Amino acid sequence: MKKGWICLLLACHLGMAYGQKNVIDEIVWVVGDEAILLSDVESQRLYMQNEGQRFDGDPYCIIPEQIAIQKLYLNQAKTDSVDVSESQVIRAVDQWITWAINQSGSKEKLEEYYNKKLSQIKEERKAMVREQQIVQEMQKKLVGKIKLTPSDVRRYFQHIPEDSLPMIPTTVEVQIITMEPKIPFEETDAIKARLREFTEQVNSGKMEFSTLARLYSEDPGSASRGGEMGFLGKTSLLPEFANVAFNLSDPKRVSNIVETEYGYHIIQLIEKRGDRVNCRHILLRPRVSDKELNEATARMDSLYADIQSNKLTFEEAAMYLSFDKDTRNNKGLMVNQNYESSHAGTPKFEMQELPQDVSKVVYGMKVGELSKPFRMLTDKQKEVIAIVKLKSRTDSHRANIADDYQVLKALVENRKREELLKDWVIKQQKTTYIRIADGWRNCDFRYPGWIKE
């Protein structure tokens, strides 16, 4: 144990014992050469409490063990040089801060809850997120790719009692046609003129690009960081954006206006590193008036009537008339892009996985039924007019191999992954120095090997 830790531990034990108030701090666990402090546990408890997580037991037993397991992974990550990108961490922190402020009601209430300034909360959260992401990458490396055959899944399925099989929520398959309102030339010209004005202000030295991005950019993910996107490769960017960003060479100059499916951008280079680039951008989106939306609705009403009168099929209309490039080549059939879902990559959706506007319409529909036109907001934040057709519905049921192979396969993969990681933790416990302070040992730990005789 390091000398500084011994001093801190002695000072704390001369002060207050665990559970009493006014303790400045205390080392409660040591894992390898890493200390877990009482303040670490309290901080984690507050974050989990704010996120609505419930503790199945004593949080002062559960949380230190969770942190200790994380320390094992982080120690291995140092040995194996496993790391994550700064931009990836910042994006996750910004998303969490936005969510937390909305949950609390205001920035001031969030600061009051944690008894810290927002800047301190951000830095603390940043360290926490970085460690969580490194742990996830380390776990992926340890487990590798789990390969299962259909017979592996069937064998697992056969050994589970029927009443222990998971319940599969209702799933649907949905076809969609979208129509985008026409953007008036005046609106497009006004946006381009505004971006040219921003460019002139930056190039002349009147304003910093980052200041303009914070004030005016309509990309919520980067605006708060002065438009900075972090280091990204070409495949992480839209082709038209990447072509311009990777051709920039002078960080003091601003690019020409770039049009993408998100709107109109101007870009400023920050730094290039090999095949990755870090740049700032300002995004402005065209505004669509009720007049244009009403006109698009009228066009969709006519299309709806033509489908209903069998002048053409829904599938034909989706292939030749839909604006949705992700579905029109698939006869309008939507594909689940939620990679955390057991239905990822398939046309199956649980209701909460559908876009909210689509879910509201589909909920009360019958199989084969066609909706009337409705307004919806796409994942690109565009307001469009849509009609949907409910292709199939599978009601909630106990999992079976015929209908739910992908779900059961994911379940078996998760079990195998958990077993491999559990075995790894048990092995690391045996070879790692571990010390738990008095008053923190009387716990029903998930891994009993923490306390060594």
Image (cartoon, helix red, strand yellow):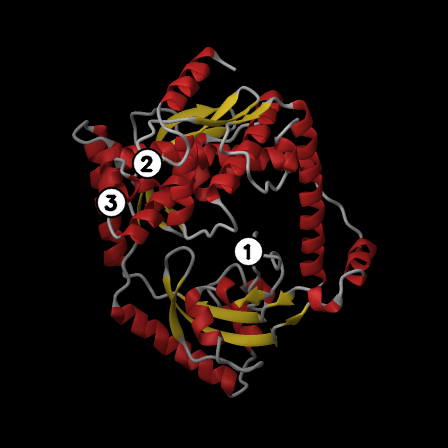
Using the image as rendered, state which of residue 33 and residue 281 is in the foreground.
33
Report crowding for label 1: few under 14, some 14 to 19, many 20 or more residues within 10 A (C-alpha).
some
What amino acid is found at the position of numbered circle 2 in the picture?
Ile
Q: The residue tagged with tag 2: helix, strand or loop?
A: helix
Is residue 117 rendered to the left or right of residue 59? Answer: left
Q: Residue furthest left?
A: 206
Residue 87's quadrant in the figure?
A: top left
Query: Is residue 295 in view?
Result: yes
Q: Which mark is residue 337?
A: 1
Q: Is residue 171 above or below residue 150?
A: below
What amino acid is found at the position of numbered circle 3 in the picture?
Lys
Q: Which mark is residue 121?
A: 2
Query: Is residue 255 in view?
Result: no
Q: Tell me which label, 2 or 1, sits earlier in the chain.
A: 2
Image coords of residue 241 (percent x, y): 42, 41
Q: Tell me which label, 1 or 3, sits earlier in the chain.
A: 3
Report crowding for label 2: few under 14, some 14 to 19, many 20 or more residues within 10 A (C-alpha).
some
What amino acid is found at the position of numbered circle 1 in the picture?
Gln
Q: Are marks 3 and 2 in contact (CB under 8 Å)?
A: no
Using the image as rendered, state which of residue 215 and residue 41 is in the foreground.
41
Which residue sits at x=51%, y=70%?
A: 176
Is residue 450 rendered to the left or right of residue 159? Answer: left
Residue picked out by circle 3? 107
Image coords of residue 448 (percent x, y): 64, 37
Q: Is residue 356 above or below residue 256?
A: below
Image quarter hosting the C terminus: top right
Q: The residue tagged with tag 3: helix, strand or loop?
A: helix
Report crowding for label 3: few under 14, some 14 to 19, many 20 or more residues within 10 A (C-alpha).
some
